Image (cartoon, helix red, strand yellow):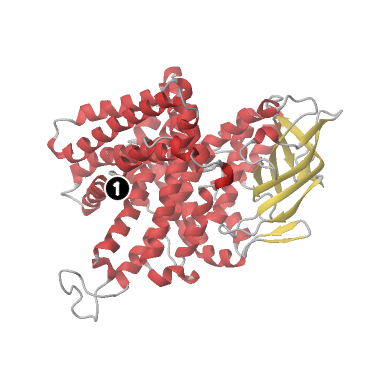
Amino acid sequence: MPEYKAPLRDMRFLLNDVFDAPKLWAEMPRLAEAVDPETADAILEEAGKIAGNVLAPLNREADEQGSKWSDGEVTSPDGFKEAYQTYADGGWGGLGGNPEFGGMGMPKMLVGQVEEMVQGSNMSFGLAPMLTAGAALALNAHGSQELKDKYLPNMYSGQWAGAMDLTEPHAGTDLGIIRTKAEPQADGSYAVSGTKIFITWGEHDMAENIIHLVLAKLPDAPAGPKGISLFLVPKFLVNEDGSLGERNQFSCGSIEHKMGIKASATCVMNYDGAKGWLVGEVNKGLNAMFTMMNYERVAVGIQGIGAAENSYQNAVLYANDRIQSRAPTGPVAKDKAADPIIVHPDVRRMLLTMRALTEGGRAFSTYASKWLDIAKFSDNEDDVKHAEAMVALLTPVVKSFLTDTALESAVAGQQIFGGHGFIREWGQEQHVRDIRITQIYEGTNGIQSLDLIGRKIAANGGAFFKIYVEEINQFIAAQEGKDNMVEFITPLKAAVANLVDLTEWVMEKAQSNPNEIGASSVEYLQVFGYTSMAYMFALSAIPALEKADAEPFYANKLATARFFTKRLLPRYISLSEAVKGGADCLYELEAEQF
């Protein structure tokens, strides 16, 4: 049976030793009132118990059973309803929510660690509170006071769940061509009609009501994305006294049969004049959606990290238990017929790759969450503006790079198990299947790459990029001359210089060839990601060096940082060469020649 234990020590290392989150929180009055080190530590401890003792034991059996659809109703796997109630009773659904409506107002740096535990222990389950939190975030930012008063308290409490309805059968990423319509009604509501697909937990039996946020167009809306509005459409209408009324005019037409996350219901939702209410301004629905998207895309990157951590933990257990052949240097377990496979160089390469990519990814998502917190909670306008630029720049990298590397980690974990990794009861093949979706939803990783180089860099002349590079270069300058940091600073300095050169190259070439952005985007984001991870490991090396002689935990951090720097960071060199291969070779074949 696969096991999961929340990596609390690693999380505390990042929050306390690397980023000094308590100091940051204390400097922002709204956070200083909500959280202190003791509260944060208690939250991590309790979340770890929920993840390890309640959610993880359900993961494999729920994957086997899946959610079931019958005549418009969805039944969640055995144990999910009870686990959801436990989660709701603990107040976890409102962890990052607005205190005005019953939320706890915790910072994303802390919430992100809790999200990793939930997703890492049971991704299919974790999608339900994740989507509710996203819907609540958009409603809190853009909904009227009346809507917030009416819906947010029960969404934060978990009594009601939430869902986001964006995609349609003919419209994936191109939301500008959606067909769902919203007809104005005399009472100020709207009649919403249309079909939405790929709606995660759009229907289920875990909560008494499900609040859908639906993208639709008014009859006179302008064409394209500028004509999209956002509507709140509850499964059950809510009476003036807060009690539930009649069922709304929409239903779940079916659920998808998927490669992974089988325990979650991915729904087709059919709206037939359903009663809804406008969220935000008319034709400004995408603005409201993207308020949620920055958080959700960071959350998706965290999903990948969580599942990769689970895969790593079980791969380590297996590698220490499975005996096969002898170590190249001679027998290690002399009392056994063979040595544990962890003695073999290639197994160690795979384990260290998993460890480095997961720890680096956790650091990078925590770093991005820091900027989300400053943008949300700081009272300093300049700090907020700076943070918003960093969030815009880093979000596509967190989502795309961390899910790409998470899949690599899970495949390595499966490989360590050999033939057993291909067998379902060992759990590793599920991680591969589950993580695969993270590269697709919330905007495919190809779209994220285009967003990074096209919108977040080229479109503003590299303004956001320059802010980030300046920060890293200031860090490098502060560390140069420290002998014990040379092994991390010298490679980081080279990687940053390469990234600057590569960015200039792409922007220059794109001026004469519009295909250059798209042709280079995926590899470019990977270079950006490896460079950013090198920055994370250099930051982590400072506290690790201070305490490495006193405690093995910190010595282990240094060993992982060294492995990344020597064996994984050099990947940016070949990726940069691929970018400079240019776009022309992609168009030598005509469409009919493929």
Residue found at x 18% / y 73%: 332
How far from the left and from the top, in percent, is residue 330?
A: 15, 72
Residue in the picture at 63% in, 36% down: 174
Secondary structure beneath dot 1 equals helix
Residue 243 visible to the viewer: no
**Residue 460: x %, y % from top left:** 46, 21
**346 sits to left or right of 94:** left
Three-letter amino acid code at the position of disc 1:
Leu
Position of the N terminus by quadrant? bottom left
| 93 or 229, nearer to the observer | 229
Does residue 446 sit above or below 208 in this rendering?
above
Query: Does residue 400 appear anywhere in the picture?
Result: yes
Image coordinates for residue 17, horizontal then vertical, percent: 29, 40
Side (left or right) of 302 relative to 256: left
Q: Residue at x 47, y 31 (%)?
A: 517
In the picture provided, is 18 more to the left or to the right than 200?
left
Residue 64, image quadrant: bottom right
Residue 245 point in image, percent of width and height: 81, 45
Above or below, 366 relative to 141: below
Number of residue marks:
1
**Is residue 312 toward the left or the right of residue 248 in the image?**
left
How dense is the environment of label 1, judged by Cα within 10 Å: few (below 14), some, or many (20 and up)?
A: some
The one nearer the camera, 590 or 328, is 590
- Check disc 1 and report the residue beneath it: 568
Which one is nearer the viewer's eye here, 133 or 219?
219
